[in-house]
Each structure stands twice: as structure tokens, then as C-alpha cells.
Amino acid sequence: MNRRAPLTRLADDRGFSLIELMVVLSVMGLIMTAFLGLLASVQRSLVRETNRSTTMDQARLAMEGIDRQVRSASILCVPTTGTSPYYTLTLYGPNAYSTSSSANRWVQYRVQSQTLQRRQYITSSWTSWRTVATGIVNSTPSGTTNVPFLPDTASQYASTSGASRLVNVTFIVNSQTSDTTSSSSKLQSAIAIRNQDATLSCSSIPAG
């Protein structure tokens, strides 16, 4: 009787050992971790740049609105004393944001809580403050460096009422409002009144 020859295992029929599988899975895990970390970093950068672009657009539009309103105003007033001098701009003139009314009225802008806010005096009272732009991180200055609103005190810009006809507007813009030392941009503009009303004075500002 012939005996069958013992079956031999071919080398290419052998499977992976447990150790080999663990090594492969570990390497794949490291690659996936690195890839996901890179993807998260790219996503954070995209969100940060989107927020920065949005914040800058808000600040530019606000600057353009202030520019239009100051140029057509009759007087502008910036307090130079107080706990936060140069942080409020008050003017009297047409509403630059209204398409239905061109009536002159008192309008105020202020920088507070890292936002630019605006209100106007209608009928007999001031409206509530409305946020115009966020990420305005002008900090309380020592002196007059980087303040939001700074009147030019040169004699050629003084009116008969003593108010300046020109104001320097500066916005320090940062979408990451918790970090005021980096990633900030500066917007600046010097804006002058075209036709100042000499009968008005800053003491005429309604209380409230």
C-alpha cells in the first residue's frame, strides 16, 4: 500500500502573526493621528482667517459710515476728560445709515467691551446702543496712543465754538479678542467736517 506524501505548507500560504498585525495597526494609528491633527490645524486656520476677514470687513464698513457722517455733520465732540477719554464721538448731522430720512440728529459712537457701538437721539431720548462692529480691541491708553477718537487740536482745525473740525479715528482690530497683543490690524482715518455750524457747541449735547 502506498503511503501519501505528507502535505507541506507553502511559504506564501502563511498568514500574519499577531505581532505583525499589532505593528501594522500601530503604524496606521500613528499615520491617522498625524493626518487628523493636520486636518484639524488646517480647519482652525481656515476658521481663524474667516473670522479675521469678517471682523475686518465690519470695521471697514463702520469706518466708512463714520467718515460719511462726520463729513456731512455740523459739529463733532470728543470728551478729553473722564475715566475713558477719547472713547466717545458725538456729532450732529444727517443719519448716514437711513435711506428714508435726511433730518439732522445727534449721533454717538463709542468703543466699549471690545465693540464699536452707536446710538442716536430721536424725538426726546437716546436710542439703545447698537453694536456696529466687534473685535475693536483699543485698550485704555497711556496718553493718546491708539485711542479710537482723537480731535486734532491744531489751530487751523478749531472752530469759533472751540470744537475741532477734524477727528483722527483709529481702530485696533482683532477677531481673537482675548489676545490683544498679536494678530491685530490697525485702521486709521483723519476725517474733517466740510461745513461746521458755528451756532452749535458741545454743551448742546442732550443728556442721557
Image (cartoon, grey):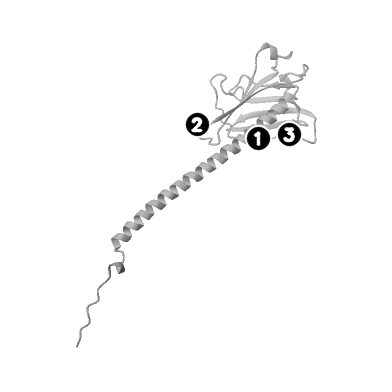
**Residue 66, position as x, y percentages in the image:** 69, 28
Circle 1 is placed at which residue position? Answer: 132
Q: Residue 51: tell me if it is visible.
A: yes
The quadrant of the rendering that contains the N terminus is: bottom left
The kind of secondary structure element at disc 2 is loop
Circle 3 is placed at which residue position? Answer: 97
Q: Mark 3: which amino acid?
A: Tyr
What's the CA distance linking mark 2 and mark 3? 32 Å
Up the image or down, 36 lies above or below 108; here it is below
Q: Mark 2: which amino acid?
A: Ser
Q: Earlier in the sequence, mark 2 or mark 1?
A: 1
Total number of numbered labels?
Answer: 3
Pointers 2 and 3 in contact (CB under 8 A)?
Answer: no
Circle 2 is placed at which residue position? Answer: 182
What's the CA distance linking mark 3 and mark 1? 11 Å
Pointers 2 and 1 in contact (CB under 8 A)?
Answer: no
Q: Residue 208: tell me if it is visible.
A: no
Mark 1, other Cα within 10 Å: few <14 / some 14–19 / many ≥20: some
Furthest residue to the bottom? 1
Up the image or down, 84 lies above or below 22; here it is above
The kind of secondary structure element at disc 3 is loop
Q: Mark 1: which amino acid?
A: Val
Left or right for 40, reference 101:
left
Q: What residue appears at the point 47 percent right and 47 percent down from the top-left corner?
A: 40
Which label sits in the foreground, 2 or 3?
A: 2
Q: Earlier in the sequence, mark 2 or mark 3?
A: 3
Q: What residue appears at the point 72 percent right and 19 percent down from the top-left corner?
A: 203
The quadrant of the rendering that contains the C terminus is: top right
Mark 3, other Cα within 10 Å: few <14 / some 14–19 / many ≥20: few
The kind of secondary structure element at disc 1 is strand
